[in-house]
Structure formats: structure tokens, C-alpha cells
Image (tube, rainbow, N blue to C red):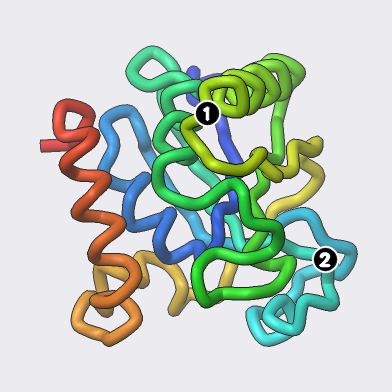
Amino acid sequence: MSSNGYEIATLGGGCFWCLEAIYEQLLGVEKVESGYSGGAVADPTYDQVCTGSTGHAEVVQITFDPQVITFRQLLDVFFTIHDPTTLNRQGTDVGSQYRSAIFYHSEEQNATAEQAIRELDASGVWDAPLVTEVTPFIEFCVAEDYHQEYYRHNAGQPYCQAVIAPKVARFRQLYMARLKR
């Protein structure tokens, strides 16, 4: 926990544009940045990450107030806005950069993530086992400026209309009471 009481969560669930567009709407979320984690190349570019050769996942780094929204609540949203049962893909986005991943910042986050996965697997909500990677956070590389707030600035683009907008609409229905006003 930082000195201001905020915590950090780093999550990968396919395209970071989708995750950012959703998490920035939640009460208690102070900041969302798109970027890369989990790789072996220092300061990778989007083009490098897209090759799948750097080992990075597209992620969002979320600064949140745990007095308003818990890490578990962030994970509850996470597991409803992407498919955690497909290895290295989300829809038509294919490659290890699109993997389902939780990069935990503390042992408490690790335990919470592992418990959430066990509970979801046991519940039968998904038709297949979850393949979400749970690994220690090491480094976050901020994506290029044009990736930040991408959906907000490009909502009319075909990818945004076909992929992001339906996810945002579904999220807003499910979590209406948790939205910023």
C-alpha cells in the first residue's frame, strides 16, 4: 500500500484498450494505465510486444482505493470482462501478449487471486478450467501515449465498435451500482 492508502493491481485480459475502458469507470479506481508486464525485454514497444517474442502481456495497471473497491472486487470484474479459459487468446486476438494474467503486488493479492480462481473453477461458471497466469509483479512498462484512453478517444473506430463497445455495455449493466457518476 502506498503512503496515500492506494494500492496497485496489474491485470492482463487480452487487449488493454478493453480493460482500460472498463476499469476507468469504476468507483474507487483513481488511475488506469495501459502497458506491458511479464516480459524479458526492457522498455518494449507495441510493435515488439505484438510479435509475441518479448514475453510481455498487454496489461492495465490500476491505482485503486481499497476503502472503496477491493482487489477481489477488481478481480470479480476481471473475470466477467474476458475469457479466462483460453490460452494466449481473446476472441480474434491471438498470441501470448493477450494471455489472461494477474501480476500480484503482495502475498495478499496472490492469495486472493488463487482463491478467486479456485472458486470460479469449482462453480462451473466457465465450461473449461481457468488458465489465468498468477505471477509476481516485476515491472510495468507504460504503453505509448496513443494507447492511453484509447476507447475514449477512438470510440467510433470499427474495432472499438465491434469489440470494446459490447464489453463496456455488458459491464455497465452488470456493475451499474459501482460506476462513477
Residue 4 image point, x, y percent: 48, 22
Q: Is residue 112 left or right of residue 52?
A: left
Write down the quadrant of residue 166 in the picture: bottom left
What kind of element bears circle 2?
loop
Tell me which numbered mark, 1 or 2, is placed earlier along the sequence: 2
Residue 17 image point, x, y percent: 43, 65
Looking at the picture, which amino acid does disc 2 mark? Gly
Write down the quadrant of residue 90 in the picture: bottom right
Q: Is residue 22 left or right of residue 4?
A: left
Q: Is residue 164 above or below residue 38?
A: below
Residue 134 image point, x, y percent: 74, 37
Q: Is residue 47 left or right of residue 119?
A: right
What kind of element bears circle 1?
loop
The 10 Å Cα crowd at callout 2, few under 14, some 14 to 19, many 20 or more, is some
Taking the spot 34% from the left edge, 71% from the top edge, the residue there is 163
Give the mark count: 2
The 10 Å Cα crowd at callout 1, few under 14, some 14 to 19, many 20 or more, is few
Looking at the picture, which amino acid does disc 1 mark? Gly
Taking the spot 30% from the left edge, 69% from the top edge, the residue there is 151
Residue 136 image point, x, y percent: 80, 36
Give the distance between the C-alpha atoms of the residues marked 1 and 2, in whole angstroms. 30 Å
Q: Is residue 97 left or right of residue 79?
A: right
Q: Is residue 102 above or below residue 112?
A: below
Q: Is residue 76 above or below residue 172?
A: above
In the drawing, what numbered circle is on residue 55?
A: 2
Query: Is there any visible trace of residue 141 in the rendered image?
Result: no
Residue where numbered disc 1 is placed: 124
Query: Is there any visible trace of residue 137 in the rendered image?
Result: yes
Q: Quadrant of the C terminus?
A: top left
In the image shown, does 153 or 4 lie closer to the viewer?
A: 153
Write down the quadrant of residue 49 in the picture: bottom right
Taking the spot 41% from the left edge, 41% from the top edge, the residue there is 80
